[in-house]
Amino acid sequence: MEPASQSVYHAKLFLLILAFLLSTNITSSAATSPRGFVTKLIHHDSILSPFYNASATIADRSTRARERSDARLSYLKAATVSETPDGVRGIMVAGDGAFLVSMHIGNPHVRQFMLLDTGSVLTWVHCFPCIGCVTTTTIYDPSRSSTYYPLPCNHDPYCAANCDEDKNECTFRAVYADGASTSGNFATESLMFYIENEAQSYASNILFGCAHVVNEPYSDISGVMGLGYGGISLANQIGSKFSYCIGSILDPNYVHNRLVLGDGAVLLGDSTPIDLYNDHYYLTLEGISVDNELLSINPRVFRRSPSGTGGVLIDSGAEWIYLIHGAYVKLRYKVELILGSYLMQTIIPNNPSWLCYLGSVSRDLRDFPRVTFHFHGADLELGITSMFQDVSDTTLCMTVEKANGNSPRDASIIGMFAQQHHNIGYDISRRKLYIHQTNCQLVN
């Protein structure tokens, strides 16, 4: 899509956003619950995941995590510097995101596993009939739901210009940076969220994309839950607040990761300002310290330029952490000084840029000092399982890597390893991000 047509598309979609946000009605069957809409977050390799592979080795899981993260990095590098239509950017590359959201759609409800994406505003679900869908869960059939309502062509100017006249439906088509696409119609529906042994919560009249055509490689997922800050984002439709708590990423038996949407979002700890740009959440990183020693990094390397390049964004799709060259080399040098005194550095043949050592995280890094990312007003502390991961039975690697190239145009990305063992709260309307180090099993 050319820049001029992008602007027209964006303006038309904004009218759609306004119309629906004015008419959206959120209700809950748990009237006494103050926590909003709560559901599980499921890591791709968790025993709760439909993609769980009991035979996967440590090397298999670490390789997949890195591949997902590298693909996400490449995607974000392209998406964050271009003005593209709502819903077009931000999907997990390779149909294989870090975390899935368990939710139900329709009445009677159908369980779906959605990719969590804080960099996309469009929430879409596979809908029957569906060309190209081979999802591991039951495909949602809107014709069987009593709460499904497709947008008609006369709903607003956007729908009038994007209309399937034969069906009188408002249509969409999202084309992603890697060439994949999904298309279908806009509709409203009821969503249900719950965690076992807890009250069920319903959100009604939620605007979403009902996808009837899905091109590889996104055919084996249920859809995407868009929690970017744009108008049709699910986060904006349900209270403009959300939070998630991530415990152990690498333990497939860990089941206490959770997502809270709406006014019940957990907003604890110190806060740092959010800079909203191109549907992504940017933060002000002021420095990095190791064992309370501030590294000699010029804070200007973390700033986003007026044109949108560079900066530091927090993201749900990448697991690894990516730093711009000037910051990465300083942190890597410090880690090499510490670990080089007692561990042997090694090279991973297929990934020679990784900083790796012969050893085990739990056995050999128990005394490794705390690494802290200092944001404006709040700190994010990274323990050893956030900074390092075992990539085999005999090798460990740092989970921080250099962003692509040496250009100041590159953005730094705070991936999910850094967010591990923290509750992260987003207050979009106040433009604040809350960081609270905690045991996610204890978060209510």
Image (spheres, rainbow, N blue to C red):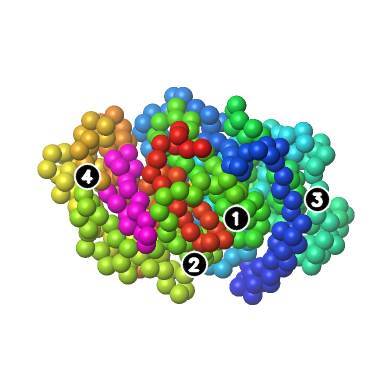
Near-viewer residue (194 or 67): 194
Instruction: Please name the amino acid that badge 3 sits on.
Output: Pro
Q: CA distance from mark 4 to mark 1?
A: 37 Å
Instruction: Please name the amino acid that badge 1 sits on.
Output: Ser
Q: CA distance from mark 4 to mark 2?
A: 36 Å
At 29% from the left and 29% from the top, the residue drawn is 393
Q: Which residues are magenta?
A: 371-386
The reply, left or right, for residue 269 in relation to residue 294 is right
Query: Mark 2 sits on what residue?
Result: 81
Q: Earlier in the sequence, mark 1 or mark 3?
A: 3
Percent position of residue 31, x then y:
68, 39
Q: Nearer the viewer, mark 1 or mark 3?
A: 1
Query: Mark 1 sits on what residue?
Result: 240
Are the residues tagged 3 and 4 within 8 Å (C-beta)?
A: no
Percent position of residue 141, x then y:
77, 38
Instruction: Please name the amino acid that badge 4 sits on.
Output: Pro
Query: Mark 4 sits on what residue?
Result: 369
Tell me, yes or no, whether the highlighted magenta stretch contains residue 216: no
